[in-house]
Image (spheres, rainbow, N blue to C red):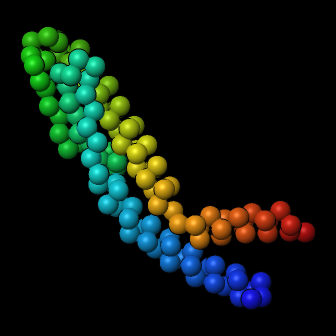
Amino acid sequence: MTDAEYYEELSRATAAALETVAELAPRLAAREVQEHSADGRVVVRVTAAGTVTAITLRNGALRKYDSAALGELVAQTLNAAQRRARAEYENALLAAVPDEVAEATRVIRDSARNAP
């Protein structure tokens, strides 16, 4: 196989692999993550896209916290849930990237290094 044929085949395989990943990405983004406050009184569910799907106040949260403190606790729990959901999404997406994409990236980097 000539270099040109190899690059052409790699290009086709990479395009197909990226199409598969593009189809997977929305499903991964829709996955929900649940996060609890340290005391368990606030539970927040979010998607990897950052959409809040549920906020639950448990075990006397309204009695334990004044409105400002409760708002802060909800915001902290929400931020933690969104960070975790985003990290899980990115890790799952990276794990789904096929070998063809890594090989194409290597070829491009090598070509750039060897360019005049």
Q: Quadrant of residue 88?
A: top left
Image side of residue 66 versus residue 6, left or right: left
63 and 68: which is toward the camera: 63
Image position of 55 with respect to 91: above or below: above
User: Residue 28: x percent and y percent?
Assistant: 35, 56
Residue 89 against residue 101 in the figure, above or below: above
Compared across the picture, whether 76 is left or right of 41 comes to right
The x and y percentages for residue 110 are 78, 65
Q: Residue at x 32, y 45 (%)?
A: 50
Q: Is residue 29 above or below residue 57?
A: below
Is any part of residue 71 visible from this angle?
A: no
Give the left or right position of residue 31, taking residue 64 as reference: right
Q: What quarter of the picture does the N terminus occupy?
A: bottom right
Quadrant of the image containing the C terminus: bottom right
User: Residue 60 lies in what quarter of the image?
Assistant: top left
User: Which image quadrant for residue 109?
Assistant: bottom right
Which residue is drawn at the image coordinates 34% and 50% (left, top)? 49
Name, please, the residue furthest toward the right.
116
- State the residue at coordinates (54%, 77%): 15
Q: Residue at x 56, y 79 (%)?
A: 13
Between 70 and 113, the one lying in front of the other is 113
The spot of residue 45 in percent (x, y) is 23, 39
Is any atom of residue 59 visible in this view? yes
Number of marks in the rendered image: 0
Across and down, in percent, residue 26 comes to 34, 61
Residue 79 or 36: which is nearer the viewer?
Answer: 36
